[in-house]
Image (cartoon, rainbow, N blue to C red):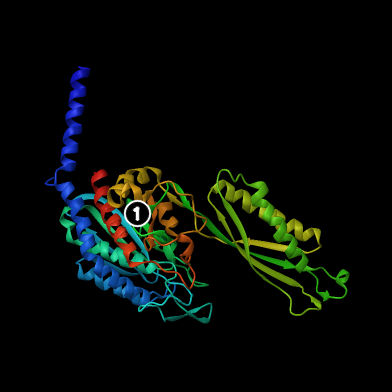
Amino acid sequence: MKRLVSILCLLVLLTGLSAFNNPTDPKAKLKDQVLELAKTVEPKVIEWRHWVHENAELSNREFKTAKYVADHLRSLGIEVEEGIAHTGVVGTLKGGKPGPVIGLRADMDGLPVKERVDLPWASKQMGEYDGNPVPVMHACGHDTHVAILMGVAEVLAEVKDDIRGTVKFVFQPAEEGAPTGEEGGAKLMVEEGVTDGMDVMFGLHINSQTEAGQVRYRKEGIMAAVNSFDIKIEGVQTHGSAPWSGVDPIVTAAQIINNAQTIVSRNLQLTKAAAVLTFGKIEGGVRSNIIPEEVNMVGTIRTLDAGMRETLFKRFKEVVENTAASNGAKATLTINEGYPITYNDPELTAMMGPTFIEVSGAANVQSDIDAVTGAEDFSFFQEKIPGLYFFIGGMPKGQNPADAAPHHTPDFYVDDSGMLNGIRLMSRMVVDYGELSK
């Protein structure tokens, strides 16, 4: 009996391998077809990327970009919803076969950065940030994300009759954060129901210091949770020549900064996960001979473990309040709501592992990268449904990563050649997940 079962298992395996290698097998044919279509649509994607880059817009102000995307989706016969989370666009493509609802996400916003890269399609746009006029640039690669997803929509629309399930193309505004006093981004999209009925979501980010054609990811936490903080220190104003007659909030601020740095190094188990506590701004005083009444500080907290985040928050409050009290001052710490950890569902990540290798080649895939202390509001989608977030390369082949400008800088640049891998991966993820989840 055992011998018979073994023979049957072998036959099933051989049949499966035969189907995989058989070019006439419908599943294999569809997988190859989307890769070929991705190459066909690449010139258009490059053209779209240049337009989006040249017309960069700030968070919650992506009006031209949203219209550009919506017009393209409609031209493909895709059902379109606009005005989601202010300027977001969601396209719905129904496949010809029953299956899951799969979300694909691209963020659309630029940054208040003046471009220094000498490109024919460099941004010369202006916008308003915190009430001030600012130059606007796609200094993080969101222009490529938009163009890639537009290309994926065209590829999948071409083969929709063979696709299992429904595809939701989610073009998201305000990933970099909504303007002061406004809501936005993935959090607002979730609140407005974008993930309702959705089974999974995939997202990518291009990287300026990773070679084009490469892909990098990891299971579980891949990007940190982020929380900004504000500290108000109240002292007693006095003449700078007689500090003993007042309470110095500037000295108190210095002590708080120094003491707070011991929280990460002495209270958190750093062998488990990384954490960062950074002060970004100190403001107080008006002239050299006046000890001011008040000092204000702001900064950022990055964590990759929920328990460690709670410990950091608790200890930070204790350090701030007790350090101030020891000087006779009063300090108030406010930790603001931020983004959760960008967490790749382990089962979904393992399921898509073969897709990364088949599309990009094993030599170009790194599946165990270190977590990044940058943050991503894609994490709000992942709180609701399983998600997988990964990085693709945008650095020209052969360039030294040390010579590539980092993200959020005036010299940031990613090459057009990096987008083809993104189109192929996103297209194949839809096809492969649809087949694997049936």
Q: Give the total number of marks visible in the rendering.
A: 1
Crowd rating for badge 1 (residues with CA inside 10 Å; few <14, some 14–19, many 20+): many
Q: Position of residue 183 (x, y in %)?
A: 47, 68
Task: Please tell me which residue lies in front, 79 or 3.
Answer: 3
Asked if one can make out residue 90 in the rendered structure from this viewpoint, the answer is no
The residue where tag 1 is placed is: 201
Give left or right: position of 391 versus 271: left
What amino acid is labelled 1 in the image? Met
Q: Residue at x 22, y 70 (%)?
A: 74
Q: Nearer the viewer, residue 395 or 305?
A: 395
Which quadrant holds residue 78? bottom left
Residue 48 versus residue 366 in the image, above or below: below
> Under tag 1, what secondary structure?
strand
Q: Position of residue 8 (x, y in %)?
A: 18, 26
Q: Is residue 431 left or right of residue 87?
A: left
**How far across and down, in percent of the image, does residue 104 sit?**
32, 58
**In this rendering, position of residue 94 left or right of residue 205:** left
For the C terminus, the quadrant is: top left
Q: Position of residue 329 (x, y in %)?
A: 78, 64
Q: Nearer the viewer, residue 268 or 193?
A: 268
Tell me which corner region of the image, top left, top right, bottom left or bottom right, holds residue 93. Answer: bottom left
In the rendered view, tell whether residue 211 sits above or below residue 61.
Answer: above
Nearer to us in this view, 319 or 411: 411
Position of the N terminus, as image quadrant, is top left
Farthest top residue in view: 1
